[in-house]
Amino acid sequence: MITSIKETISDGTRTRSRYGFFVNNLYIALALLLSIPVFVVINHYVNSIGIHEDETVSFAATVCFILGIFAGRYIIQFWTTKLKSLPKTEVILLATFIVICTAWLFFHADFPLQGRTGINLMLFWMPFILISLMTGALIKIIHAVTQNQLQDAQALATTSKSELHLLQSQLSPHFLFNTLNNMYGISITDHQKIPELLLKLSELLRYSVYETTEIYVPVKEEITYIKNYIEFEKIRIGDRLVLNLEIEDLDKSDIKLAPMLLIVFIENAFKHAKNTTDEKIYIDIKLSTWGNSILFSVRNSYDKDGQVKNKFDKNNGLGLANVNKRLELLYPQNYMLNIQEEVNAYLVELQIRIR
């Protein structure tokens, strides 16, 4: 049904574009404005070839030229409705014919056929009308391609925005699922931590649900969220955690970032580090600005062979896949992501141009 509605709207737009040229006030105003220089040029041409009643002839030729542009535009639009790129061959041919016909008019003005009034009129009016028709067709082709590309860009932007909102809406449930899964284990082995963890969890969920509805949020808000999450993990992991945190104090509200973008990497770091068999786990997080970019890195303990197999493995990787897609949508050609799996460490480096 949605498809049929879109097609109906599209057909209606095309119908209006076919007939709107003749009734659109803007086009009429442009035609009247164009007729002034056209009349001046034609009148000068008519005077140069010695035609009597030059103003009448010039006025008639001007009207024919403007109507020819309208007609050329109308004739060609049935072919241009689906043009996505400029047809170079056709455009070059039209431009070439316009130049040739214009050159012929000046040549004919200098060398008319003697005593052949009817043929002279035909040799003038035929190329003149062709010039107007081909000019209208050329204008329509360029305009149609521009409009079609604009419509495609708008449709793509709408689709990307919908996809982005969908991806963003997946983050909170994904985070909540992982956190509750971890808290289940703690409730069995270290249940006295649960009240404090629940309090921190409520703060994290409040931000992820209510304060991340915008496409971009101030970095300082994201930093506050990251620090709250780290405090949550400190309570959960305890003395086993060795954390190095270097986060630049960014109070400027004009520095913005996609919400919950970095937390996916930090959450992943804690998960990988926690699942190692080492007595201590090491996590190093750095966030700063450099020039017009945000620099972020996180390194964590990692033991590929020692990773604990989780029964919920089918959901692993959702966060990373999500963040990769969001980076492509929000920062096309404006980010660099480097992920390295080393012998005893897992490293993520991200550079994003500030929007």
Image: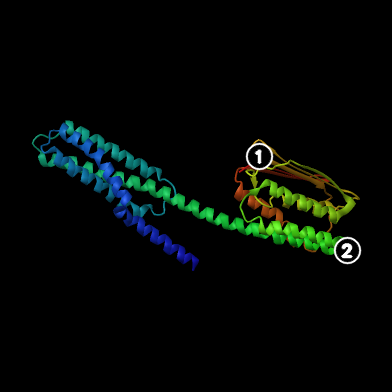
Confirm whether residue 277 shows in the render.
no
Q: Which mark is residue 265?
A: none
> As drawn, which residue projects farthest toward the right?
279
Q: Position of residue 261 (x, y in %)?
A: 68, 50
Which residue is denoted by mark 1 in the rendering? 293
- What is the quadrant of residue 103 in the picture? top left
Who's the residue at 73% across and 52% down the image?
Answer: 225
In this image, 208 relative to 105: left or right? right
Q: Nearer the viewer, residue 260 or 196?
A: 196
Q: Which quarter of the figure is the C terminus placed in?
A: top right
Relative to residue 310, is residue 87 depicted above or below?
above
Q: First in sequence: mark 2 or mark 1?
A: 2
Relative image position of residue 233 (x, y in whole percent): 82, 54
Please give left or right for residue 320 compared with residue 56 in the image: right
Q: Is residue 154 above or below residue 117?
A: below
Location of residue 54 (image quadrant): top left
**Residue 64 in view in this figure:** yes
Along the line of sight, the residue nearer the viewer: 326 or 189? 189
Foreground pick, 28 / 250: 250
Identify the amino acid type marked 2: His
Rate crowding at label 2 as few (under 14), some (14 to 19) or many (20 or more) other CA atoms within 10 Å.
few
Residue lying furthest left in this view?
A: 115
Q: Which residue is mark 2?
A: 191
Counting the numbered discs, the total is 2
Residue at the image position 39 percent from the left and 58 percent from the top: 13
Q: Residue at x 29, y 53 (%)?
A: 22
Local crowd size for mark 1, using a 10 Å CA cut-off: few (<14), some (14–19), many (≥20): some
Please indicate whether residue 301 sits to the left or right of residue 130 in the image.
Answer: right
Which residue is at a point 21% across and 32% down the rendered structure image?
107
- Which mark lies nearer to you, 2 or 1? 2
The amino acid type of the residue labelled 1 equals Ser
Q: Position of residue 181 (x, y in %)?
A: 80, 63
